[in-house]
Amino acid sequence: MKYRAIIKKHSEWWIGWLVDLPGVNGQEKTREKLLESLRVGAEDMLATAVPFDPEGLMTTIEVPPLTWMTESRPMEI
């Protein structure tokens, strides 16, 4: 799977976060290390078990594709 990442150089550091996985962010000295850090953060988040609440109901919602999602243009990282 691919996730959208916002990355930028800030002073001596590269900083970034995943738009699609709130809470996955990183700060590294190189662009390559930042991208790897974001990959590891995404893997960790997706591997985390979601606790079941016996009084809760887990469901899904459908969100129609947005116009920009249906356009075929490459995502660059």
Image (tube, helix red, strand yellow):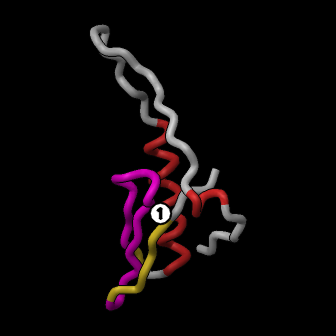
**Residue 62 in the figure: left or right of residue 48:** right
Which residue is at 62% across, 74% downward?
A: 76
Expressed as whole percent of the image width and height from the top left, the position of residue 5 reads 49, 66
Which residue is at 52% across, 62% downward?
A: 4
| Residue 50 belongs to magenta span | no
Which residue is at 45% across, 71% downward?
A: 6
**Which amino acid, by three-letter code, is at mark 1?**
Ser
The part of the image, by quadrant, that contains residue 67 is bottom right
Decide: is 47 above or below 30: above
Which residue is at 47% across, 63% downward?
A: 37
The part of the image, by quadrant, that contains residue 14 is bottom left
Residue at far bottom of view: 11
Decide: is 48 above or below 59: below
Tell me the crowding category of disc 1: few under 14, some 14 to 19, or many 20 or more residues within 10 angstroms, Cα based.
some
Query: On the rendered image, what quadrant is the C terminus found in?
Result: bottom right
Q: Which residue is mark 1?
A: 37
| Residue 22 belongs to magenta span | yes
**Residue 60 in the figure: left or right of residue 51:** right
**Frontmost residue, 43 versus 67:** 67
Residue at far left of view: 55
**Frontmost residue, 77 versus 29:** 77
Expressed as whole percent of the image width and height from the top left, the position of residue 42 reads 49, 51
Residue at far right of view: 72
Which SS class for mark 1?
Answer: helix
The part of the image, by quadrant, that contains residue 32 is bottom right
**Residues rendered magenta in the picture:** 11-27
Expressed as whole percent of the image width and height from the top left, the position of residue 45 reads 43, 44
Expressed as whole percent of the image width and height from the top left, the position of residue 23 reads 34, 53
**Frontmost residue, 67 versus 29:** 67
